[in-house]
C-alpha cells in the first residue's frame, strides 16, 4: 500500500504564489486544480480496486481496504468543499457593484 503523500506540493505552490507572479507560468492555477482532481480520481480508483480484491479474497487485510476507502472519502470531501468555496467567492464577486 502506498503511503499518504504530504501536502508539500501545495505548500510550495502557495509559497511561490505569495512571492508574486511568475514569469511563464506553465498552467498555473488550472494545472494545480487539474492535478488535484486527478489525485482524487486516483484515490477513488484505488479504493474501488481494494474493495474488489477484498470481495474476491485476494486481500485479507480489511484495515488496508478501510484506509483506502477513508482516504478516498476525505479527498472527495475536500474537493467538494474547495468547489463550494470557489463558487461562493465567484458569487460574492458577481454581487459587487462597480
Image (cartoon, grey):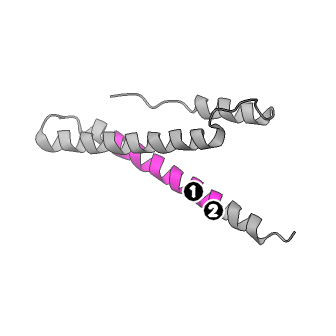
- Per the rendered image, the range of residues in magenta is 66-86
Mark 1 touches mark 2? (CB < 8 Å): yes
| Visible residue check, residue 37 | yes
Q: Is residue 77 magenta?
A: yes
Residue closest to the far left: 56
Q: Residue at x 32, y 39 (%)?
A: 46
The residue singled out by tag 2 in the image is 87
Q: Position of residue 59 (x, y in %)?
A: 18, 34
The residue singled out by tag 1 in the image is 83
> What distance separates the C-alpha of mark 1 from that of mark 2?
6 Å
Chief SS of the magenta region: helix
Q: Residue at x 25, y 40 (%)?
A: 49
Quadrant including the C terminus: bottom right
Q: Residue at x 17, y 35 (%)?
A: 60
Q: Judge the density around disc 2: few (<14), some (14-19), many (≥20) Cα neighbours within 10 Å.
A: few
* Secondary structure type for disc 2: helix
Tell me: 39 left or right of 52: right
| Visible residue check, residue 66 | no
Amino acid at each position: 500500500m502506498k503511503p499518504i503523500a504530504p501536502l508539500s506540493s501545495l505548500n510550495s505552490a502557495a509559497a511561490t504564489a505569495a512571492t508574486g507572479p511568475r514569469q511563464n507560468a506553465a498552467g498555473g492555477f488550472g494545472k494545480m486544480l487539474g492535478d488535484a482532481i486527478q489525485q482524487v480520481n486516483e484515490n477513488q480508483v484505488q479504493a474501488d480496486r481494494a474493495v474488489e480484491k477484498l470481495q474476491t479474497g485476494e486481500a485479507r487485510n480489511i484495515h488496508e481496504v478501510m484506509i483506502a476507502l477513508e482516504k478516498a472519502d476525505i479527498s472527495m470531501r475536500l474537493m467538494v468543499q474547495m468547489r463550494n468555496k470557489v463558487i461562493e467567492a465567484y458569487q460574492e464577486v458577481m454581487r459587487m457593484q462597480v
